[in-house]
């Protein structure tokens, strides 16, 4: 007598394979396409914006220049008083350069 509840291995394999393919594709999609919530959390942790993470910022290229990045890092570790003096001086040079370009 044939047992209708018994599933033969040939019936298990396709659905099992399809299940694994679906699972692998789902994981791959999630890794390549994080949810907006995940992107927001990552941006918050890094102290930036989702747009910046996606490269939608004009200023993004500024941080690709190793010399500029090193300058920012050097300034960031200075004591507050020296940092303030340096940034004030840089601000004055920038204003002067802008005025000379007029």
Image (cartoon, helix red, strand yellow):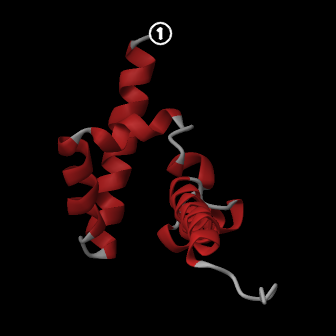
Q: Relative to 72, is 100 above or below?
A: above
Residue 42 in the image, given as x and y percentages of width and height = 54, 68
Residue drawn at (50%, 40%), measured in percent from left and top?
55
Q: Quadrant of residue 72?
A: bottom left
Query: Among all residues in the image, which is located at the extreme right?
Result: 4
84 left or right of 21? left
Q: Residue at x 43, y 22 (%)?
A: 98
Single out the residue that lies furthest toward the top. Answer: 102
Res 77 quadrant in image: bottom left
Q: Farthest front residue?
A: 1
How far across and down, in percent of the image, does residue 66 sit? 19, 44
Total marks drawn?
Answer: 1
Q: In the picture shown, does residue 75 fall above or below 9?
A: above
Label 1 Cα neighbours within 10 Å, binned few <14 / some 14-19 / many ≥20:
few
Eyeballing the image, is 40 above or below 7? Answer: above
Q: Secondary structure at mark 1?
A: loop
- Taking depth in this image into account, of 32 and 51 the one nearest to the observer is 32
Looking at this view, is 89 or 8 the one in front? 8
Q: Nearer the viewer, residue 75 or 30?
A: 30
Residue at position x 46%, y 38% from top?
A: 59
Q: Residue at x 64, y 70 (%)?
A: 11
The residue that mark 1 highlights is 102
Q: Seen in the image, is 53 located left or right of residue 68?
A: right
Coordinates of residue 3 in the picture (x, y in percent) = 78, 89
Which quadrant, please, contains the N terminus?
bottom right
Residue 76, located in which quarter of the rendered image?
Answer: bottom left
User: Looking at the picture, how far across and down is residue 13, in whole percent?
Assistant: 56, 70
């Amino acid at each position: 007598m044939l047992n209708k509840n018994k599933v033969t291995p040939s019936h298990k394999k396709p659905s099992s394979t399809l299940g694994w393919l679906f699972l692998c594709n789902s994981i791959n999609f999630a890794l390549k396409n994080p949810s907006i919530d995940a992107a927001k959390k990552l941006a918050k942790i890094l102290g930036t914006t989702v747009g910046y993470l996606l490269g939608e910022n004009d200023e993004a290229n500024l941080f690709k220049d190793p010399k500029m990045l090193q300058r920012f890092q050097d300034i960031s570790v200075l004591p507050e008083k020296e940092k303030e003096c340096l940034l004030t001086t840089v601000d004055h040079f920038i204003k002067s350069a802008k005025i000379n370009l007029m």
